[in-house]
Amino acid sequence: MFGEQTAEILFQIITECMDDYLYIFDLQNNIFEISQSAVNRFNMSESVLTDAANEVMKVVYEEDRRMLAKHLADICEGREKVHNLHYRWLDKEGMPVWINCRGIVISDQQGKAEYLVGCLNETGNKRRADNVTGLLGGPEFLAYLRAQKNPLPRDFLCM
């Protein structure tokens, strides 16, 4: 549909517009590409990993590696067509961060898993606002208060 260069540009533009981290995992060539914002957040140095099976595991919290490896093997062997796991990645300081990684398997003409395409998001992130009430969450509310031109009265109660 798109040329390779156009697809790459679209990937970069879309990833800059999202809080989630998009990824494309070329299962047959063992190449993994993820949003640059993930490289900035997690314990990885490049957005394209050319030895993906090994390099991705270095970012995954040690206790979660076996589970992920088994699931990826099931995908490669055709037993799974959907990826939807909660596990931990390591941030730049080596601290675990809970994520939800979702993706869809795209098969080649012979029916063999070729790509896993999806997104990864941090499940521990606080919502910016409550979906029902519309009230701002803690960090967003503080940013709103700090952005006010006139100082707020000294003594008021926030609940």
Image: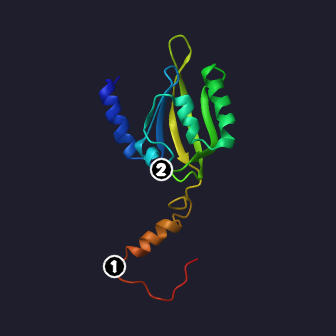
Image point (64%, 34%), residue name: 68
Horizontal arrangement in the rendering, residue 115 relative to residue 72 (left or right): left
Tell me the amino acid under the disc marked 2: Arg
Nearer to us of marks 2 and 1 is 2
Image point (42%, 84%), residue name: 152
Tell me where residue 66 appears, x and y as whole percent.
69, 34
Disc 2 element: helix
Q: Residue 14 falls in which quadrant of the image? A: top left
Q: Residues within 10 Å of mark 2 (few under 14, many from 20)?
A: some
Q: Are marks 2 and 1 in contact (CB under 8 Å)?
A: no
Tell me where residue 128 appears, x and y as whole percent.
50, 60
158 is higher (above) or lower (below) than 47: below
142 is higher (above) or lower (below) than 102: below
Tell me the amino acid under the disc marked 1: Lys
Horizontal arrangement in the rendering, residue 38 relative to residue 149 (left or right): right
Q: Residues within 10 Å of mark 1 (few under 14, many from 20)?
A: few
Q: Which residue is mark 2?
A: 41
Disc 1 element: loop
117 is higher (above) or lower (below) than 13: above
Earlier along the polypeptide chain: callout 2 or callout 1? Answer: 2
Circle number at residue 112:
none
Q: Quadrant of the N terminus?
A: top left
Image point (41%, 43%), residue name: 36
Give the colour scheme shown.
Answer: rainbow
158 or 30: nearer the eye?
30
Tell me how far mark 2 sits from mark 1, CA to CA. 32 Å
Tell me where residue 146 appears, x and y as whole percent.
41, 75
Tell me where residue 8 appears, x and y as whole percent.
34, 32
Q: Which residue is mark 1?
A: 149
